[in-house]
Amino acid sequence: MTAIRNDGLRDISSEAGRTGDAIRSEMIKLRARVRTLAENRARVDADTFTRELRVRTEETARAMYAACEDRAVLLRIQHRLARRVNADLLLARGDDEPSVDARVRELLVAQLDMLLETPAPHGRAGSSVANADLTPGAVRALRIVEQHRETVRARFRALRSKVQTDLADLALELAGETAARLCLLYGQQGQEWLWWRLSRIVDQLVAISAPPSLPTSLELLATRSVLSGLEKFR
């Protein structure tokens, strides 16, 4: 009888280990799905945003060119912007607003370079007015730059907010599906046991998560939300 009892305990222990691994696997798959969704959505929206920025920046560069009295005035502004953006790019760390702002201004400097390299139309050659510290045309051009920056910032904030909201909704939906699937597969072993096992796995996954980023934040949201989803089945 002792041998039979020990064999039975080993079988139960083995089965519990396999079940635990299967639950952990479900949670890891959920996080992978959420991360893939976040990265794909971010990639698509970044491409769309970049195309939009190129059009807006080209228009801004042409408006600055038209505002300046001559090419020499525009050249002075371009040099001023280039010095500032080079310093800001050294601080760029990712896709936060200051980093995006710096890259957009880098794109504007490149567009101004292209305009300045083209042959000057009649009447747009350099003149002595460029020696002034701040001409009326330069003031108009710098105002155009600031308007462009504010437009880009507002667009970036709106896009980021929409992406975060949409992806959070998807992460919660996937978490609910995972919770329902786990209850269907393992609920017969006891809701309290499943809650305990999942709580341990969630704590472990949260503990090893990388520093916050949008994909990581969404992974954590989905991971924690599985436990909330289980409340509906307890």
Image (cartoon, rainbow, N blue to C red):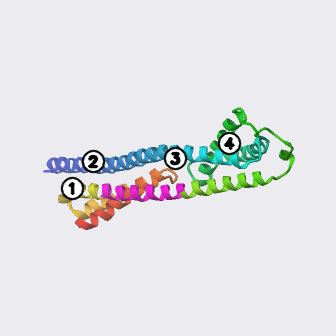
Q: Nearer the viewer, residue 53 or 25?
A: 53
Magenta-colored segment: predominant secondary structure: helix
Question: Picture quarter containing residue 221?
Answer: bottom left
Q: Position of residue 16 (x, y in %)?
A: 25, 51
173 in magenta: yes
The residue identified by callout 3 is 52
Magenta segment, which residues? 155-175
Q: Position of residue 116 (x, y in %)?
A: 71, 37
The residue identified by callout 1 is 186
Does 1 appear above or below 188?
above
The residue identified by callout 2 is 22
Give the class, few, some or many, for how many residues have Cα within 10 Å of label 1's Cα (few <14, many ≥20): some
Q: CA distance from mark 1 to mark 2?
A: 10 Å
Mark 4 or mark 3: which comes first in sequence? 3
Mark 4 and mark 2 residues within 8 Å of each other at the beta carbon: no
Q: Residue at x 86, y 46 (%)?
A: 131
Mark 1 or mark 4: which comes first in sequence? 4
Q: Residue at x 61, y 58 (%)?
A: 150
The residue under label 2 is which amino acid type? Ala
The residue under label 1 is which amino acid type? Tyr
Q: Residue at x 51, y 43 (%)?
A: 51
Decide if residue 92 is in sight here.
no
Does 140 appear above or below 80?
below
Give the class, few, some or many, for how many residues have Cα within 10 Å of label 4's Cα (few <14, many ≥20): many
Question: What is the secondary structure assignment of the residue under circle 3?
Answer: helix
Give the class, few, some or many, for how many residues have Cα within 10 Å of label 3's Cα (few <14, many ≥20): few
Q: CA distance from mark 1 to mark 4?
A: 60 Å
Q: Determine which of the numbered discs, if any, sits on residue 109 in the image.
A: 4
Give the class, few, some or many, for how many residues have Cα within 10 Å of label 2's Cα (few <14, many ≥20): some
Judge depth for marks 1 and 3 and give the one in front.
3
Q: Nearer the viewer, residue 10 or 157?
A: 157
Mark 1 and mark 2 residues within 8 Å of each other at the beta carbon: yes
